[in-house]
Image (cartoon, grey):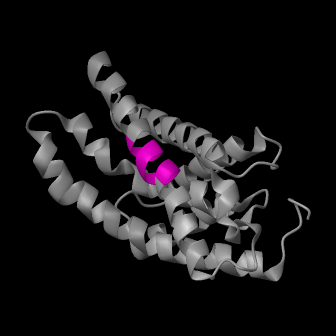
Amino acid sequence: MSHYRWRTVDIVVASVLAAAFGVIFWAWGLLWNGPAAAAFSGFFPPAAAAIYGVWLLPAVLAPLIIRKAGAGIYTELVAATISALLGSVWGISTIWYGLAEGLAGELGYAAFGYRRWGLPQALVASVLSGATAAGLDLYYYYPEWSTDWKLSYVAIVIASTVVIAGFGSVLLTKALAGTGVLDRFPSGRVRDLV
C-alpha cells in the first residue's frame, strides 16, 4: 500500500474528520475565551493551556486512522478553515495556525518514513504540534509575559497535547476500530497501535 496515494475513502474520511473538528474548534474557542480565560486570568493565565490539546487532535488522529502522508496537514488545515468560516475569534490567523500545526504533527509520522503508526509516532507528532502552537502563541499573543510564564505555557501546551492529542488519538483510533468503522483502513487492526 502506498503511503502517498490517496483513495476516495481516505479523502472522505479526512474531510468528515475535518468538518467535525472545525465545529469543535469553533466551540472550543468560545470556551477558551470565556470560562477558561475567566478561571485562570486572575492568578496564572498560562494554566488555561491545559485544554489546548483539543485543537491539535486532527493533526495526530487523521494520520493514525488514514495512514497516508498529508493526512495531518489536510485535516488540521481544513478544520481550522471551517472554524474560521464559522467565526473563530482569531479570524483568518486560525488558518495559518492550522497549516503550521498540521505540518508539525505530520513530521511526527514523516520522521518514521510513514511506515510506523503507533503510540510513539503519535506522541512525537503531538509534541511537535504542541511546541509549534505554543511558539506561535507566545510570538503573536503573549510576547510581554515573563520568561517563567512563557516556559510554563509551553510545558502546559505540550503536556495537554500529549495527553489529549497523543494518547487520546490512539485511544480514539482503537475505539473506532473496535466498532468496525475502520475496516477499510489498516488502522482497523488495533494490535499495531502500541
Name the residue furthest left.
42
Q: Quadrant of residue 29?
A: bottom left
Question: Residue 80 versus residue 182: which sits nearer the camera?
Answer: 182
- Picture coordinates of residue 140 (x, y %)? 41, 37
Task: Report x, y in % for residue 84.
Answer: 46, 67
Task: Give the image location of residue 17, x and y in percent.
Answer: 57, 73
Vertical placement of residue 105 versus 54, above or below: above
For this rendering, which residue is in front, 153 or 139? 153
Is residue 125 in the magenta section? no
Where residue 107 appears, as percent x and y from the top left, is: 70, 42
- Residue 146 visible in the snapshot: no
Q: Quadrant of residue 1?
A: bottom right
**Residue 16, image quadrant:** bottom right
- Apparent side of residue 107 relative to residue 82 in the rendered image (left or right): right
Judging depth in this view, the residue of 8 and 101 nearest the camera is: 8
Q: Is residue 113 visible?
A: yes
User: On the picture, is 71 further left or further right than 33?
Assistant: right
Q: Which residues are magenta?
A: 160-167
Residue placed at 14% from the left, 41% from the top?
41
The foreground one among 77 and 55 is 55
